[in-house]
Amino acid sequence: MTHVIGQRIPRHDAILQVTGKAEYGIDLARRGMLHAKVLRSALPHAKLLKLDTTRARNLPGVAAVITAADVPNNRFGFTHLDQPLLAEDKVRYRGDAIAAIAADSLKTAEEALRLIDVEYEPLPGIFDPVQAMEPDAPKIHGESNIASHIKIRYGDIELGWSRSDEIVEDTLTTQMIEHASIEPHAALAEVDGRGMVTVHSSVQRPFLIATDLSKILKIPLNRIRVVVTAVGGGFGGKNEITMEPYICLLALKTGKPVKLVYTREEEFQATTVRHPYIVKYKSGVKKDGTLVARQARIVSDAGAYVSWGESTLSKACIHGAGPYRIPNVKIDGYLVYTNNSIGGAMRGFGVPQLGFAHEVHTDHIAEKLGIDPLEFRLKNALVDGSSLPTGQVLESVPLKETMRQAVQLIGWKKEVAWDEKAR
Amino acid sequence: MKKRGKGIACMVYPIGFTSYPNPSAAFVQVNQDGSAVVLTGATDVGQGSTTALAQIAAEELGIAYDAVTMVTSDTQRTPFDLGSVASRVTYITGNAVKRAAGDAKKTLLQVAAEMLDVMSPDELEAGDGKIYVKNSPDRNVSVAAVAREATLVKGRPPIGEGSYNPTTTFLDPETGHGKPYEAYVFATQIAEVEVDTETGQVDVLKIAAAHDCGKAINPLLVEGQIEGGVAMGLGYGLMEEMVLENGVVKNPQFTDYILPTALDMPLIETAIVEVPVSTGPFGAKGVGEPSLIPTAPAIVNAIYDAIGIRIYDLPATPSKILAALKEKERANILKEEE
Amino acid sequence: MIERQIELRVNGQSFTILVKPQDLLVDVLRDQLGFTGTKKGCGTGECGACTILLDGKPVNSCLMPALRARNKDIITIEGLGTPEHLHPLQQAFIENAAVQCGFCAPGMLLSAKALLDANSHPTETEIRQAISGNLCRCTGYAKIVQAVKAAAQAMTQGDGNP
């Protein structure tokens, strides 16, 4: 029998991609379609005192302008319903949307943006998550800027310290990253005579887009259809709704197809990013190189809204001990609101931040003990039957085998002994 | 002076959503000519999942890859799928597609049992576009003939449905204990770098990336995922950074937000470590996100090996490396003076 | 705004169109002439997705006024090859999995074509230099470089040259 599994088969649609025939979000077009633009906040933190769209509405070529008052249900979010589609009384970061416009050309839409009159009352901004945790810091939502505290407790950390010969501490920080899909967010909405709303969008999760649209627009799911175009890269950035509610509302208002493509600048300023983390590691180890305790304190800059920040931090905390057997673990993760860009889902979901931190920390420990970094990892690596700090017992753990095969490809600084049964 | 070093980094990463149910569903129909249509809500965002899912359906139905057409990602034409996130599509949607194909195959085998005059469908297997008797493969009938018979003679079109949701639990809020995921993957990367001590410039010479993915449904595409992840990891480690001032992004263009180009990327050697898992479709897990995780720390650890400077804040830019080198020099001079 | 009537030669075909002085070639190609295979990723000439060939040279069509493309030969991805008649580079990109999301592929392929037209036996470094203006966020470039090598080999064998 021939098997299809394991075959090196090229992508099913590569022939369309290499001939320019794949239709991406930016390629969508309909006869008579309108072009949309979004007005973003000019300040990182402010009260909205006045919002007047009259001049924009009166510009020839403008078909519709929407503000918060036009959104049937102006809240969304996964774990925290903290984000408005269009700002109401307050703006919380420079990407906050205030109004959206549909016009017969992109130029007219851009011109109309400048005719929207907004009056702000600036509020003190907070841009450092550690400062934002202070009790007297300006508040972005409600009473506290700490949106979540995630805890992992395994074994007895105090016992771990008491059994350690050496304790190593490090503070590591990671930066804010943009997904940088080469295709920006792009979508087109159209409404047919029966009131069926169809959105064509370059996204990763059409069913989430549809259910969120249903809640925001208050339209049942059988009258919303989300169709995914060819997607020019996602990496988590096209995981959630962005522009779809605006163009649906504008299409419903005008009865015409409405298209929106974010500029590269909007991609950077207004869409989600990879959270910057500050990670404090403290590890206890025996002279022979056995890890006995690890503590981590993680501060994640959520930005102005939680979005996927809590679930990202949770995944980071669960893997905070790294791929090692450590009997005593204590991890605390804090998700903190600031007036920075919103952290969202991005490839690796918190683990790239922690991975950098625990692996550099691990090398530091090995150096303190005078043990080769590979040997130190082999000594402590997870194996079949090991537990994570969640208490979950792992079944198939070929970690040591990945070490062996990586060394085979590139060599290592010294010969190490490979345990035959070690996979 | 140019100095070389090697650094290693390892990781563990889960497949699927944390704790929350995250199901996928699929429908399969086998046409009267033995070809098949698969409906799935999963989206191919470039990772190649649609191709891998077609391979899973083809293998399960015993037909050729080219005989499978995929209909994907349309909320009114395809069944529910949680989405192309969390490295979950091959494992979770793959299981759903395998189950749906298996469900359609059940009808085919029942009809074929009568056609081949065997007691039970259990005596049959599908492969190479045929349904054959396990112990005597010469007794066979084409999938096309069986699908035609099932549809037009028996009146039972060979269709199937399947869904899959990994078994997970929520974590205790005080201890974090529970079973948030069903499967995990593991990886090791080793980087070799050359650091110019005059400029602080880091040249990554080579990266070896060994990734456990259970079973590679399509090794060509798995390699692509690993190589692409390494590039994203290299950008994370050495060059990418959004700079904000009072909430304003100061570098909102690719002019100042530097992505790795073809000239920045070293030779990437990949190893696919295959230890099939019983819960995955044909043993598969996933590979999409993990590939970028070990790259930045492997490079940073290699920089330490080369010049004795440990970078604690990403990215490891030439200016940070130079400043650390100067600091180290100053400390050495002070030590000598003592 | 003054509109001018000009003639553009795209993939060997002539088009008479009206353009304003500030109209960019990428927008004219995509929106007026329907050559949407030319992609637009940044609008500032950094990502290379809009790369086309102008008299055989790769240029970022998002930086070029359409007026300046008069009397020149423009090649877009649609002119490189079709699904029925693929260019060896397109064939090699498919077979080597040089394409993931595919958004950079049109520009990448045209930069590679310009290279192979000028240099039928490029070294790996020459290939990397030739495509260094085309950003790809998916592949890490490894399979793209491999595909360009494979196409170079296939093309020189096709010519009967060793």
Image (cartoon, rainbow, N blue to C red):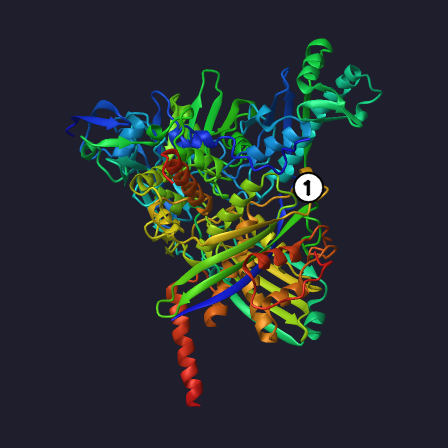
Q: Residues within 10 Å of mark 1 (few under 14, many from 20)?
A: some
Marks counted in the figure total 1
**Residue A383 location, quadrant:** bottom right
The residue pinned by badge 1 equals: B283
| Above or below, comparing residue C55 to residue B16 in the picture | above
The one nearer the camera, B93 or B214, is B214
Q: Quadrant of the C terminus of chain B?
A: bottom left
Instruction: Name the spot of residue A86 as percent of width and height, x first.
Output: 42, 38
Secondary structure state at the residue bearing disc 1 = helix
Residue A271 falls in image quadrant:
top left
Task: Name the outermost residue toward the right.
Answer: B119
Q: Is residue B296 visible?
A: yes
Q: Position of residue B193 (x, y in %)?
A: 46, 62
Viewer-nearest residue: B249 or B268: B268
What residue appears at the point 54 percent right and 65 percent down from the top-left corner? A360
Q: Is residue B76 above or below residue A117?
A: above
Q: Is residue B79 left or right of residue C48?
A: right
Pick the front one: A383 or A393? A383
Question: What chain letter is assigned to the residue under label 1?
Answer: B
Side (left or right) of A126 relative to A172: left
Q: Quadrant of the N terminus of chain B?
A: bottom left
Q: Position of B131 compared to A39: left or right? A: right
Percent x, y for residue C152?
A: 39, 40
Residue A71 visible in the snapshot: no
User: Where, by quadrant of the figure, is residue A116 drawn?
Assistant: top left
